[in-house]
């Protein structure tokens, strides 16, 4: 077997942080600003970083999975796919139209929608394959997983980065738009549609609570609620999350499998 279980917890190298998806520095960390636009852009960066860690963890372990772990890894990967799909569907159907209405500028988020379209074909092809795997219509192939991910990770990573300055640019509307309220409404709707035992932990288990010195209160939920989501609902499928970038304590860790 070419893979070994990694127990290293080096603070400088975990096996997932070098790509293909790149982590984003939050505007709040860069500038120290606390206005609503900086806040929203920073929260979005944190969500995007969860996605990047998750996809990197899949990418780097895909070729190392032993047959005994195929089922759990497929489930982990598909939950991560579904989480991002829900996030972007929420943007396109709720958040972006709300921003257009609040600003009175139709098409103001069009560049972001075009970026979605750029990575969607490869992303959805990967998702369709993962769905087939969950239904027993195909068998695991690490090389195929990586090849499918290679078809969309570059434009996806670029989009996740570019959306942050787009949100910051909305600051020109000042107090005429309550961007925090708009994003909160979208987030609440998306979260209600996520499984608390599947897609929700896919985000939470890939959030590093130590990121940028631990300055962020993320997710923006009361601490007891986050604890229950992780330690009650998250434990239901606990075998899935061994492949994630972070532990149940929210701290970054080495990948479960390394070459």
Image: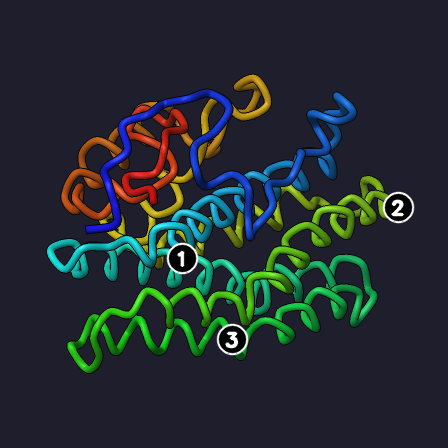
Q: Nearer the viewer, mark 2 or mark 3?
A: 3
In the image, farthest residue toward the right: 172
Per the image, the residue denoted by label 2 is 172
- Which of the numbered marks, if any, corresponds to residue 83? 1
Frontmost of labels 3 and 1 is 3
Q: Which of the marked residues, 2 or 1, is nearer the chain's N terminus?
A: 1
User: Quick one: which residue is furthest to the left in this view?
Assistant: 68
Instruction: Say whether residue 140 is left or right of residue 192.
Output: left
- How many residues crowd around disc 1 within 10 Å: few (fewer than 14), some, or many (20 or more)? many
Q: Position of residue 159 (x, y in %)?
A: 66, 59
Q: Residue furthest front?
A: 2
Q: Secondary structure at mark 3?
A: helix
Please say if 68 is above or below 89: above
Q: Secondary structure at mark 1?
A: helix
Front in this rendered view, residue 171 or 239: 239
Count residues near mark 2 (Cα–Cα under 10 Å), then give few for <14, some for 14-19, many for 20+.
Answer: few
Please tell me whether mark 2 or mark 1 is closer to you in this view: 1
Q: Which residue is mark 3?
A: 122
Residue 181 location, quadrant: top right
Give the mark, 3 or 1, whose residue is nearer the N terminus.
Answer: 1
Residue appearing at x 71%, y 47% in the figure: 164
């Amino acid at each position: 077997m070419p893979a070994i279980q990694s127990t290293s917890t080096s603070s400088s190298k975990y096996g997932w942080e070098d790509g293909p998806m790149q982590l984003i520095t939050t505007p709040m960390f860069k500038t120290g600003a606390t206005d609503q636009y900086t806040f929203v852009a920073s929260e979005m960066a944190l969500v995007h970083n969860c996605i990047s860690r998750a996809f990197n963890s899949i990418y780097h372990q895909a070729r190392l999975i032993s047959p005994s772990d195929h089922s759990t890894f497929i489930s982990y990967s598909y939950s991560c796919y579904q989480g991002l799909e829900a996030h972007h569907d929420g943007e396109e159907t709720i958040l972006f139209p709300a921003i257009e209405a609040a600003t009175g500028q139709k098409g103001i988020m069009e560049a972001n929608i075009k970026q979605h379209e750029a990575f969607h074909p490869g992303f959805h092809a990967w998702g369709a394959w993962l769905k087939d795997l969950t239904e027993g219509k195909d068998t695991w192939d690490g090389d195929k997983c990586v090849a499918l991910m290679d078809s969309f990770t570059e434009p996806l990573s670029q989009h996740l980065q570019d959306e942050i300055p787009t949100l910051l640019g909305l600051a020109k509307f000042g107090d005429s738009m309550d961007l925090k309220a708009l994003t909160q409404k979208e987030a609440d709707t998306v979260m209600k549609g996520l499984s608390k035992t599947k897609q929700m932990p896919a985000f939470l288990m890939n959030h590093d609570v130590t990121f940028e010195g631990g300055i962020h209160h993320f997710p923006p939920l009361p601490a007891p609620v986050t604890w229950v989501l992780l330690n009650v609902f998250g434990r239901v499928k606990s075998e899935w999350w061994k492949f994630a970038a972070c532990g149940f304590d929210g701290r970054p860790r080495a990948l479960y499998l390394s070459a």
